Image (cartoon, rainbow, N blue to C red):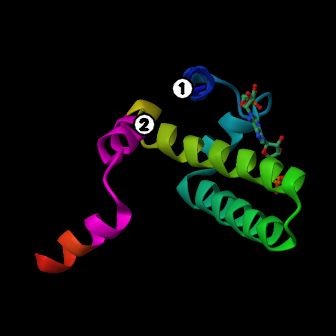
Amino acid sequence: MSDTLLRLMAVLNDRKYADADSSYVASLYAAGTDKILKKLGEEATETVIAGKAGDKQQIIYETADLWFHSMVLLAHNDIDVEAVLHELDRRFGLSGLEEKASRSKK
Ligand SMILES: N=c1c2ncn([C@@H]3O[C@H](COP(=O)(O)OP(=O)(O)OP(=O)(O)O)[C@@H](O)[C@H]3O)c2ncn1[C@@H]1O[C@H](COP(=O)(O)O)[C@@H](O)[C@H]1O
C-alpha cells in the first residue's frame, strides 16, 4: 500500500525540475510555500465538509487530495514521505491516551 506513496513521492521530487506550464506540481513549487499551504488548508476544509456529510465516496476523494497536497508540502521541504511512515511506525502500538499522559507528566 505504501508503495503508492513512495512512487508518488518519486514523481513529486522529479517535478522539481519540470516546467510550471506543463506540471501542476511544478506550478505549486513555483508559486511557493504560501500557495501550497493555501491548497492544503482548502483540501483539509473540503475533507471536513465531506466527513460532516458522511458521504463515503467524497471522503475518499477529498482525503486523496489532502494526502496529495501534504506530500507536495513534504517534497517542497525536501522531506521524504518515508520519514512520516517511520514516525507512524514509531508510534505503532503506543496508545494515544498513554502518549498524552506521558506528555502532561513532563
Ligand atoms: N495525485 C495527484 C493529484 N491529486 C489532485 N491533484 C490536482 O490538485 C488540484 C486540486 O485542486 P482543486 O480541487 O482545488 O481544483 P482546482 O480548482 O483546479 O485548483 P486551483 O485552480 O484552485 O489550484 C487539481 O488540479 C487536481 O488535478 C493532483 N495532481 C497530481 N497528482 C499526482 O501528481 C503527479 C504529477 O502531476 P503533474 O505535476 O501535474 O504532472 C500526477 O501524475 C499524479 O500522480
Provide residue 17's location: percent of width, then percent of height: 58, 23
Provide residue 93's location: percent of width, then percent of height: 34, 47
At 37% from the left and 63% from the top, the residue drawn is 96
At 85% from the left and 55% from the top, the residue drawn is 56
At 82% from the left and 65% from the top, the residue drawn is 50
Provide residue 6's location: percent of width, then percent of height: 54, 23
Out of 4 and 94, give the one closest to the viewer: 94
Name which residue type carries label 1.
Asn
Cβ of mark 2 under 8 Å from ligand 1: the answer is no
Crowding near the residue tagged with mark 2, few <14, some 14–19, many ≥20 C-alpha atoms within 10 Å: few
Q: Secondary structure at mark 1?
A: helix
| Residue, far bottom | 104
Provide residue 1's location: percent of width, then percent of height: 61, 25
Q: Is residue 85 above or below residue 40?
A: above
Query: What segment carries the magenta color?
Result: 83-100
Out of 16 and 67, give the one closest to the viewer: 67
**Which residue is under mark 1?**
13
**Which residue is under mark 2?**
85
* Prevailing secondary structure class for the magenta stretch in the rendered image: helix
> How far apart in space, not on screen, are marks 2 and 1 (Cα)?
17 Å
Crowding near the residue tagged with mark 1, few <14, some 14–19, many ≥20 C-alpha atoms within 10 Å: some
Q: Earlier in the sequence, mark 2 or mark 1?
A: 1
Which quarter shows the C terminus? bottom left
Using the image, tell me which numbered label, if any, was put on residue 35.
none
Name which residue type carries label 2.
Leu
Q: Secondary structure at mark 2?
A: helix
| Residue, far left | 106
Out of 81 and 27, give the one closest to the viewer: 81
At 63% from the left and 24% from the top, the residue drawn is 4
Is residue 91 one of those drawn in magenta?
Answer: yes
Say whether marks 2 and 1 touch (CB < 8 Å).
Answer: no
